[in-house]
Image (spheres, rainbow, N blue to C red):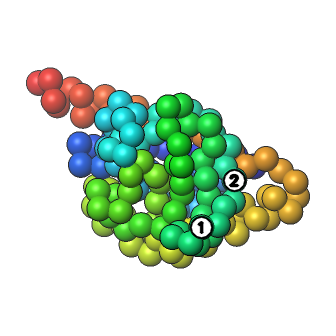
Amino acid sequence: MEFNLTRVYKSGGTNGTLTLNGQFVCFTIELPWRENAKNISCISEGVYELQPRLSIKHKAHLQVLDVYNRSQILIHAANDALVELQGCIAPVMQLTGIGTGIQSQRALQKLLSLCHQARDRKEQILLNINSNRYEYLKQIQQTNA
């Protein structure tokens, strides 16, 4: 199973759309891109394996494995990237602004359900992170104009 996360980068945060087989799953919020710096940046684009995980702080969530130069990158519930995230990804049902959204716990449960079904089928769970290049290039052009 491979999820596709398509990002749009903004200076105040990163918003994304998570799909599976071309079907919408949820939106995502993350920190802005700051060259993959620990605790202040979203992670680099690429393909990562996801693994279900439990912790006292986040309860049931997902861990993003083998992120270059980073550790403990998770997919967990949060509604404000700048306040609640340190490089992790938060699923949300609805975006409310740049790096903000609502109904994160509901989106996480939807995502976890899909992942547990894949685990039951003994499938590897992958996350392919890419970006909406058109939006990115438009932003760069406006910045350099």
Residue 133 image offset from top left, x and y in percent: 40, 32
In the rendered image, is residue 137 in sight? yes
The vertical placement of 6 against 63, above or below, is: above
Image location of residue 116, percent across then percent down: 76, 65
Viewer-proximal residue among 84 and 3: 84
Q: Nearer the viewer, residue 133 or 119?
A: 119
Q: Is residue 132 visible?
A: no
Mark 1 burial class by Cα count in 10 Å: few <14, some 14-19, many 20+:
few
Residue ID for mark 1: 55
Q: Determine whether, in the image, residue 58 is placed left or right of residue 111.
A: left
Q: Residue at x 31, y 35 (%)?
A: 34
- 58 left or right of 30 in image: right
Where on the picture, by quarter, is residue 115? Answer: bottom right
Point out the residue furthest to the top here. Answer: 144
**Which marked residue is nearer to the observer: mark 1 or mark 2?**
1
Element class at badge 1: strand
Q: How far, Cα to Cα, is label 1 from label 2?
A: 13 Å
Residue most extreme to the left: 145
**Residue type, label 1:** Ser
Q: Closer to the camera, 63 or 144?
A: 63
Q: Which mark is residue 51?
A: 2
- Quick check: 24 above or below 139? below
Q: Furthest-front residue in view?
A: 56
Q: From what the image shows, is residue 67 above or below residue 104?
A: above
Q: Residue at x 15, y 30 (%)?
A: 143
Classify mark 2: helix, strand or loop.
strand
The residue depicted at 69 percent of the width and 59 percent of the height is 52
Examine the image and state in which quarter residue 134 appears. Answer: top left
Q: Residue at x 60, y 47 (%)?
A: 64
Q: Nearer the viewer, residue 16 or 88?
A: 88
